[in-house]
Image: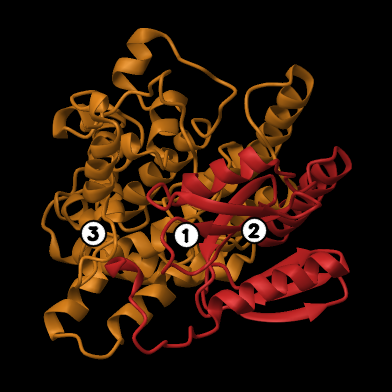
Chain colours: A red, B orange
Amino acid sequence: MPLELLLILVVGGISAIALLLHLSGRSKPKVMTEPQARAAWLRQFPESPIADLTLARDGHAALIQTADDSAPLGLVWSFGADTVARFLEDAKLSPCKKGLHLRLADFSAPAVQLHLNQPEAMLWQGMIEGASAPQPQMQNQPRAQEV
Amino acid sequence: MDAVSFPDVTQLAVPIFIAAILGEFLWIALKGRGGRYETRDAVTSLIMGAGSVASGILLGFIAWGFFMVLWEITPLDLGTSIGVIILCFVLDDLRYYWVHRFGHRIRWVWASHVNHHSSQHYNLTTALRQTWTGTFTFMMVVRAPLVLLGFHPALVLFVGGINLVYQFWIHTEAIGKMPRWFEAVMNTPSHHRAHHGRNPRYLDCNYAGVFIIWDKMFGTFVPEQDSDPVDYGLVYNIATFNPLRVAFHEWVAIYQDVTQPGLSLKERLLYAVAPPGYSHDGSRDTSETIKAKHLARQPRDSGTPGF
């Protein structure tokens, strides 16, 4: 097959399929309910049960505190029609117009745009930064496992 | 007989691929069942397919040169009769089985193949989510015996192309089960759905290209279970539609693992060639540990297919 014809077929075919899918509503991100967000987290991390879950108002993301207090916060979010989840290790957080922007130290999950209103964004920022801040060492204070 | 030439069937099939994808999408849209489509996922898969063809055009000379050297060496020439073409097709399918199995069990090869499994969807576009980096796995050596046995390199590549074209139609949820005799011998949508599953049960099963008999012969066959619907994608799903990241993410991960400080030479090597999930400190899960942990949570699955 001549290369020019192959190129036309490939570019034309991809464009036509993309247009058809978009116009038929196949571009909408998944909206999660709380049980769906829980299930999505456990689908990725079945050995990390959830202690607390905070679902974004738009249902596109949820912050996860696992039962393991020493584990970092987790995030489950809409990825097209599906979901993905990560622990927020080495995440860089920056407020933006739409809510919060997270950059992850993960080549296969480089960034997440969280669509949050202002009070929600402040709450989430506090939770994420609070969880990643170093905990003060208290003298003569028994450690959790010794209680 | 170096003037032997065969058509490039994968390129010729491009119009059929496009028409079939449109047909599958319309079927799903009209019937309301038989699979799912998502715009960015599908476009990423299609771009990966186009990139794979481009990679073949740009790098294909390496494998071709290797095969032609072998062809110069071998004293055997089986010709291109119909019988030889059929024999070559069957033997090449056996070659495919092992290359595919290596692709799931050797991280260096998995780094190339992983992108084919990186979609959480399973439709005809998923079939086209193909590697850009296959040349760098050096799996062309597994084809060497065919050439040395006297199958012309052009014939070997021709039957390999037919093999890939066959595998296109099995990437669908629109077809349930084929007739029993067909399911017994051939790779089918049902068998290949199981292969794409991230469920512990379906990890490392059904490597077949065309004939499912290889999995049955080598003990890797797991039938799709109605009681355990296939959850498509990777054990650790990626969160990017960027084709460059899809194509190279596992290569980057290998680089990061191999170059971390404090490892012995053996550990660095194992990060590159051990089964996916290997870690020097046991902090990650391989498919074996994932299955074992699943059985610890669900002991009743013990002894069922895949466990």
- Asked if badges 3 and 1 are on one and the same chain, I answer yes
Return the disc, 3 or 1, that comes first in the chain's sequence: 1
Q: Distance between the residues labelled 3 and 2?
A: 28 Å
The amino acid beneath tag 3 is Pro
The one of A48 and B96 positioned closer to us in this rendering: A48
Q: How far apart are marks 3 and 1 (CA)?
A: 19 Å
Return the disc, 1 or 2, that comes first in the chain's sequence: 2
The amino acid beneath tag 2 is Ile
Q: What element carries label 2?
A: helix
Disc number placed over residue B131 in the picture, else none: 1
The one of B278 and B175 positioned closer to us in this rendering: B278
State whether residue B159 is above or below residue A135: above
Which chain hosts label 3?
B
- The residue depicted at 61 percent of the width and 50 percent of the height is A83
Return the disc, 3 or 2, that comes first in the chain's sequence: 2
Residue highlighted by disc 3: B275
Q: Is residue A104 visible?
A: no
Is B230 positioned to the left or the right of A85 in the image?
A: left
* Neighbour tally class for label 2: few under 14, some 14-19, many 20 plus, Cα within 10 Å: many
Q: How far apart are marks 1 and 2 (CA)?
A: 11 Å
* Neighbour tally class for label 1: few under 14, some 14-19, many 20 plus, Cα within 10 Å: many
Which chain hosts label 2?
B
* Neighbour tally class for label 3: few under 14, some 14-19, many 20 plus, Cα within 10 Å: many
Residue farthest front in this picture: A140
Residue farthest top in this picture: B180
Q: Where is residue B221 in the image (x, y as percent from the top left)?
A: 25, 29
The one of B284 and A134 positioned closer to us in this rendering: A134
- Asked if badges 1 and 2 are on one and the same chain, I answer yes
Number of numbered callouts drawn: 3
Which chain hosts label 1?
B
